[in-house]
Amino acid sequence: MTDGITFTRAIVCPPADSYASGLTTALLGAPDLVVARAQHATYCTALKRLGVEIITLPPDRAHPDSTFVEDTAVVTAHGAMLTRPGASSRRGETAAMHDALAAIYDAVDTMTAPGTLDGGDVCEAGSHFFVGLSARTNEAGAAALTAWLEGQGCTASTIDIRGDAGLLHLKSGLAWLDGKQLVAVSEVAGDPALVGFDVLVVPDDEAYAANCVSVNGSVLMPTGFPGVTARVALLGYKVVPLEMSEFRKMDGGLSCLSIRVP
Ligand code: CIR
């Protein structure tokens, strides 16, 4: 680990009873709620073992996608901004996140219309942030976040994934491990915004594993992707494998399940 961020807390929200009625394009069948809750609990335990305090929001039955908390806010060491999620069915998720963030940060900013942005489109790489333009994040949302990040002393660049039908969010295909090290699917790896970074390119048949999460020197990775897992380990990272089947069924990945706070 050369230049990572130390995370002290993570905000999570266990899947609600309504979880299976959330948005999905995955065609992998209905998720098993009991298994999803067990996988979520294991995820939280893994974060705790890495020194992260878990802040748990109550399951939100009115919002089936509310377990994917990452989409509702972007945080830095100094501040937090609530997003305006691209899917209108998810906009009400930000109220609970506001309360959690207000207990941590002096001020919580809020994105306004016409901007839309999902936190899954925001890949933090130290003080630089890659912001995806996607079906969920529009130009106004990306511009508003960029201005906000600059006010926080950070920089940002955009990556347009609107032509990549297989990517729901930028972080579906891009992760930062630490320093200059990124993990990316081939569609994202060649983007000019990544010049100057080292990119581990994920093979197409293991693309789901590009959504991995670097936490305090270890890398959380979904099980079932031996090629990319071995390559991350070869780079010197300790890999923590986690079963994600019931979240993948709802288009979710490891990063979506938490907001990690420095
Ligand atoms: C959605 O479509 O909004 C959810 N079913 C999945 C969100 C996944 N979030 C993420 O990748 N950051």
Image (tube, helix red, strand yellow):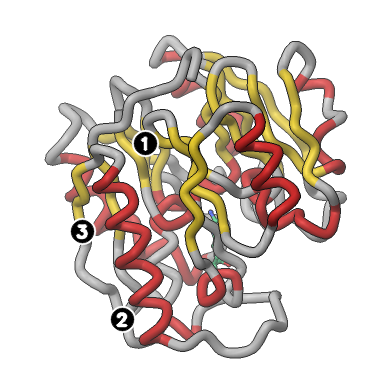
**Closer to us: mark 3 or mark 1?**
3
SS at badge 3: strand
Question: Residue visible at 68% across and 44% down?
Answer: 230
**Closer to us: mark 1 or mark 2?**
2
Q: Is residue 196 left or right of residue 46?
A: right
Q: Earlier in the sequence, mark 2 or mark 3?
A: 3
Question: Residue visible at 16% across and 35% down?
Answer: 104
Coordinates of residue 9 in the picture (x, y in percent): 24, 39
Work out whether 173 lies above or below 95: above
- Residue linked to disc 3: 56
Question: Residue visible at 75% across and 11% down?
Answer: 196
Q: Is residue 141 left or right of residue 164?
A: left
Q: Earlier in the sequence, mark 1 or mark 2?
A: 2
Numbered badge on residue 49: none
- Residue linked to disc 2: 61
Q: Quadrant of residue 189?
A: top right
The answer to whether one can see residue 118 in this image is no
Name which residue type carries label 2.
Arg
Residue in front for this viewpoint, 262 or 50: 50
Could you tell me how far apart the alpha carbons at marks 1 and 2 are, in whole angstroms?
24 Å
Coordinates of residue 114 in the picture (x, y in percent): 56, 46
Work out whether 31 lies above or below 80: below
Name which residue type carries label 3.
Thr
Name which residue type carries label 1.
Met
Q: Quadrant of residue 17?
A: bottom left
Numbered badge on residue 81: 1
| Pointer 2 with pointer 3, Cβ within 8 A | no
Residue in front for this viewpoint, 96 or 248: 248
The answer to whether one can see residue 245 in this image is yes
Coordinates of residue 143 in the picture (x, y in percent): 60, 29
Q: Quadrant of the C terminus?
A: top left
**Closer to us: mark 2 or mark 3?**
3
